[in-house]
Amino acid sequence: HELAVLVARNRTGTVTYPCVETLQVNHICQTVIAPARIPRQLREQACELAVAATEAINGTGLFAFEFFLTESNEILLNESAPRPHNSGHYTIEACETSQFENQIRAVCGFPPGAATMRKPVAVMVNLLGKHNKKAAVGCPTEVFMAQDAHLHVYGKKDSRVGRKMGHLTILGMDVDDCLKTADNFEKQIIF
């Protein structure tokens, strides 16, 4: 598994977002599943490692950490980023406080906001360009009508194969249902 954890930290406190699972296709993050589909103790261990790494550098701000979970359940730090991260885009709708708001809170010295999820499950799918041409979004109205589906279009004027053009977040009670809905909608949205 590939995992990710966000940490917001400043002198007033530290907040850790849920450990998520990231699914890669052709070396691009395609899907983020929150929380990760691994045992709770492993999710907690990944969160503890992310906090320890942030504290080790006395970090202020928002930090994203990516981990590998080995077959023997070892958690290995792969990468870190001192900023909001694609693996945390789901937080816009899924959490009480988004990664973007907590970045601002952290650097301004305000207490971090809660990272509690609003629903038990969130699935975020990156929407990738399928053609090399001027960007034009094609999206069925059912995506906009779905109660717990949230579409973000980045406004890039040119689409390229594999380029991140936006993302879609689905909130729900069951991971399989959210994955199915996200997959169905993702196939219908064209850039």
Image (tube, rainbow, N blue to C red):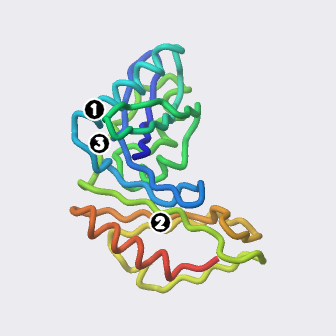
Residue occupying image coordinates x 42% and y 37%: 5
Residue identifier under label 2 = 168
Residue occupying image coordinates x 44% and y 41%: 4
Q: Residue furthest front?
A: 72
Please name the amino acid that badge 2 sits on. Answer: Leu
Place of residue 37 in the rendered image (x, y in percent of width and height, measured from the top left): 28, 50
Q: Which mark is residue 44?
A: 1
Label 3 packing within 10 angstroms: few (<14), some (14-19), many (20+)? some
Please name the amino acid that badge 1 sits on. Answer: Glu
Q: Quadrant of the C terminus?
A: bottom right
> Which tag, 2 or 1, sits closer to the chain's start?
1
In front: mark 2 or mark 1?
A: 1
Q: Nearer the viewer, residue 68 or 171?
A: 68
Please name the amino acid that badge 3 sits on. Answer: Thr
Question: Left or right: 136 with respect to 138?
Answer: right
> Which tag, 3 or 2, sits closer to the chain's start?
3
Place of residue 170 in the rendered image (x, y in percent of width and height, measured from the top left): 37, 65
Secondary structure of residue under mark 1: helix
Measure the C-alpha gap from mark 2 to mark 1: 26 Å
Q: Are the residues at dot 3 and dot 2 in contact (C-beta closer than 8 Å)?
A: no
Q: Nearer the viewer, residue 181 or 149?
A: 181
Secondary structure of residue under mark 2: strand
**Quadrant in which residue 119 is drawn:** bottom left
